[in-house]
Image (cartoon, helix red, strand yellow):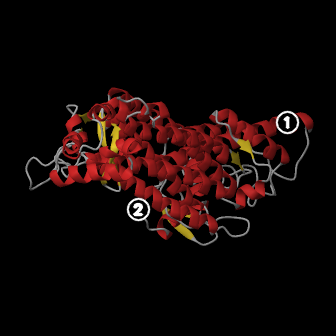
Amino acid sequence: MRTESDFIGQREIPKNALWGIHSLRAKENFPDNTPFHKEWFMAVGIVKQACYATYLDFLQGISKKYPNQDFPFQLIDKNLIEILKNVASEINQGKHFENFIVPAIQGGAGTSINMNVNEIIANRALHIKGENCGDYDKIDPFEHANIFQSTNDVIPTALKVAAIRLLQNLENSINKLRTQVEKTEKENRNILRQGYTQMQAAVPSSYDKLFSTYNNALSRDWWRISKCFERIKEVNLGGGAIGTGLSIPRFFIIEVVPNLQKLTGLPITRSENLSDATANQDAFVEVHAILKAHAVNLEKMASDLRLLASDIFHNKEVHLPQKQVGSSIMPGKINPVIPEFIISSAHKVYSNDMMISNLAGQGCLELNAYLPSIGHALIDSIKLLIAANDTLAKNLFADLQIKTNHRFENVLKNPSVATALSPYIGYHQAAKLANEMKNHKITVVEANTNLKIINSKILHKLIQPKELLKMGFIISDTINNE
């Protein structure tokens, strides 16, 4: 064991642990088991990498402009900064995550996140130099690992980096799903199906029209997600505690974001108002609202397919892939587990949306203390939606089957088909035909034979699939139909 101290007191730390006293206090103060997202941890690494790269530029700049000049502040050795930069790069690769012990739900606006990473960087750097972990007189989590940084600019900037990276993955997953949905749409073009409104039979439609509604919704989702980058590309890195840049060199403030942009390859820019970017989290509210809209579309799609494939439809035509055994007591039962996963994920996104909105409003004056929970919920939603898109594409649409056997007679038996006749015979006469069909459970042709409301040749033409699926009618359709 080793002994570490802060101005509160002392604690014993495992000898070779890369975390230290500040991480331990956070773990004890926030006894929650919700794991912190690794993507955010990795993004903190690349943000600190940019900070160290900027510090190296700072050293080079002042050595040229002020050679042999003594400064009131102590400069860090270039070689040490290089080591810190390399360790930050390791964190960006996901290394040392086992030493990140702070839970996702916490207090402190992210200070615990920042200090856990600072301690990992300092102790890993000590290890590289052949020193003992905890020898902070040589490499310090505050003086060295956190140089010219604040929790309040590093952690929200890292959140935006993590979110943008994940949003790129979400874009790809939406496009993969769109490809599968579009394939299903093309395979079922002009295949008649019964349309429904309010769970009651409506007018005839087709399967390609149904799947086109999903395809178009996903297209809108993709477009909206692509706009999210504009909403969160502005960062407050370099702003320090409250966005004023106090105690940070102006050179660092100006150069650190361009360095981060180079390292990440992301369209990140420095906010024109660093205080605004530090105090307000409405950008996350806006982005998550777009995620919520996507979740709504996925839920609608999954709910529709679950209903159409259910045993409630005695002559069901939609058949979901059989993915796993559905019951521990009922042999042979298969449940719609993929739609159920989608619906559950969507509702988790809805709950995250409410929390993000509420906590964003809880920001107080210059800072929002609830950024860790906001960030965790945001990343949680993005990852859930990626998973939802992926499983829909792979485990549902890839093997979805439509078995209609061209049941044209089913459409002709549904009273709603009389709607196609109303331009020719009027609403009330069409209603008589519909009632005749309903009361005697007969086709529209048989009902018309009984009631003799419309010419049989005209009727035969109007109930053909191509006529039923036409986009409306034109006046000439109603003339000379003999």
Query: Residue 49, image x and y in percent?
Result: 65, 40
What is the number of the mark on residue 471?
none
Of 87 and 43, which appears nearest the observer? 43
Q: Residue at x 60, y 57 (%)?
A: 285
Q: How many circles with numbers are drawn on the protein?
A: 2
Q: Residues within 10 Å of mark 1 (few under 14, many from 20)?
A: few
Q: Residue at x 85, y 36 (%)?
A: 61
In the figure, 337 relative to 355: above or below? above
Q: Which residue has dot 2 on it?
A: 33
Looking at the image, do the residues carrying marks 2 and 1 touch, with CB atoms under 8 Å apart?
no
Between the C-alphas of marks 2 and 1, the distance is: 46 Å
Residue in front for this viewpoint, 229 or 77: 229
Residue 135 at x, y = what percent? 60, 53
Residue at (47, 68) in percent of width and height: 28
Q: Position of residue 330 (x, y in %)?
A: 9, 54
In the displayed image of the protein, which residue is found farthest to the bottom?
8
Residue 360: image quadrant is: bottom right
Q: Secondary structure at mark 1?
A: helix
Point out residue 23 in the picture as x, y percentages from the top left corner: 53, 60
- Residue with the mark numbered 1: 61
Viewer-proximal residue among 410 and 111: 410
